[in-house]
Amino acid sequence: MLKFLKKPWFIITSIIILLIGFFTSIACIKLNNLYKPSFYNYASYISANNRKNLEKQLDYKEFGTINEFNVAISRNQAAAGIGTDSQAIQLIKQDKLKKIDYEKIFGKGIKTPEKFLTPVIWEHLNSYDSFLLTDSYGKMYEKPRHLWEYFVPYYIQEVVIAYNHTKNNNKKIKVEENDSYYEILKKLNKANYKKIGLLDDYRNNLAIGSTRLSQSNNSNYVDKFNEINLNVTENNYKSQIQSFINLIKDSFDTTFKNTKKLLLDGDGQVILRNLIDPNSNVDVAIMFNGDALDAYYSEDNFEQVPTGSITVVSPKHSIYSLDGLIINKNFDTKTLNKYYETIRNSFFKGYELTKFKNGKYDENASVQALEKETFDTKTKEYDYEKLPFLSNFDLINYTPVYRIEYDFIKKHYFVNNNNSLDSEAMGIYDLKATKTNSIKPISFILASIVNAYYNRKIKE
């Protein structure tokens, strides 16, 4: 052995260098592989391929309730995610959200999403302007804020009633145009439908309660939907909650404790699966139209359940919820810029194919561009996995908010094997309203109070 290797100083120095190199390597591995900003989303609200793409750069998390996402944003645990319109309003008023860089979503020169969106969705976004004149303390903004500046629309949902007629000897009910939630459920109960599945969404359920609001001692009921206008206050939340409970009890002859006749769950996929599963007693559901459309195509979930086993009806008063991307204000801009492409490639890539003529949306040219991009010459079919937004739609079936997607799906998705159009499926998909009713934002403090009271009352 060489003499200098025996010297203590050399051995010590060598060990120190090795240790420094080792710990530096470990630190680099942690920085490169372990630290990922958190991205929050609802369960089952992105395709498998898009989720894998997102997870390469971001720590993907699913929340059970929207309040979990609110808390994560407030505590800076969430960098970004998919939330709701009314939620975003309160976060904007609290100065928790970062403005969207639309050039990184739709391309150079794009400052707003207006020309990409269907007119009814743009109007829906602008309907919130009156809530963004002041901050959460009531102080006037120097310049009014707009929801679309902080919120990239994803999909819109409508609350509907669906029933599985194959579980009840194919009995169908006759629904009149102005039938309410109460009247439709009453007809289904009379037709011997046995168990109802309810989506546990307290804001939607309060709105349903307002369609048959109790007046005095729960003996007299009046439709107050338009008057209350999907708003919740300290003065009306208790009556809306009790009215919802009474509506379900009086129409379907059940209490919330009776699990033989009622399933309550916050996951729309659970309600969906139970509605179509031949081994489940659930044969009626109040759910979102996207889940109802998925249920309509029941063979995709259960081979033994034929497509068309589900009938979907829309009550007199429509309740809508718009979901979209929001970004935490404290997400460092330099860091965010590295992740914009990943987010775009998981949700929004392909919308830039939208074509315009004289500054106006060109439907034919847009759909043709999308057809060219997705047509598979081998299978002679359109490949929905070629673009992220089509891949997402193919999974969730919620109503698109972007013109090019809405028109492409309407033209191609509902074609039967004999090239005829499935008008029933189209009816579930189609956004019939020229104006949407929007859930009004409330403070997080009031939301916590209302949610706690709601949870207590439905367990009584």
Image: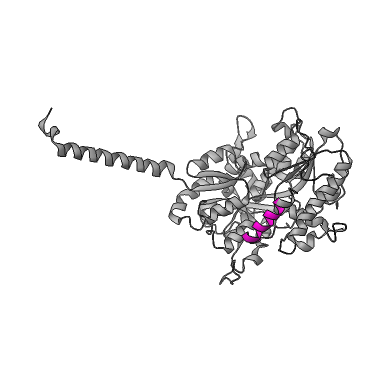
Please indicate, yes or no, whether residue 413 appears anywhere in the rendered image: no
Number of numbered discs on residues: 0
In this view, the residue in front, 58 or 137, is 137
> Which residue is rendered at x = 84% and y = 45% of the image?
252
Where residue 47 appears, x then y in whole percent? 59, 39
Q: Residue furthest front?
A: 460
When the figure is inspected, residue 317 is found, relative to residue 94, above or below; the finding is above
In this view, the residue in front, 286 or 75, is 75
In this image, 450 relative to 47: left or right? right
Please indicate, yes or no, whether residue 329 appears anywhere in the rendered image: yes
Dominant SS in magenta = helix
In this view, the residue in front, 153 or 102, is 153
In this image, 393 relative to 219: left or right? left
In this picture the colour scheme is one colour
> Which residue is rendered at x = 44% and y = 45% of the image?
35
Question: Is residue 443 covered in magenta?
Answer: yes
> Which residue is rendered at x = 35% and y = 40% of the image?
26
In this view, the residue in front, 43 or 170, is 43
Q: Residue furthest left?
A: 3
* Quadrant in the picture for residue 133: bottom right
Where residue 386 appears, x then y in whole percent? 57, 38
Question: Is residue 315 covered in magenta?
Answer: no
Q: Which residues are magenta?
A: 439-455
Where residue 73 appears, x then y in whole percent? 54, 54
Where residue 209 appears, x then y in whole percent? 78, 54
Q: Quadrant of the N terminus?
A: top left
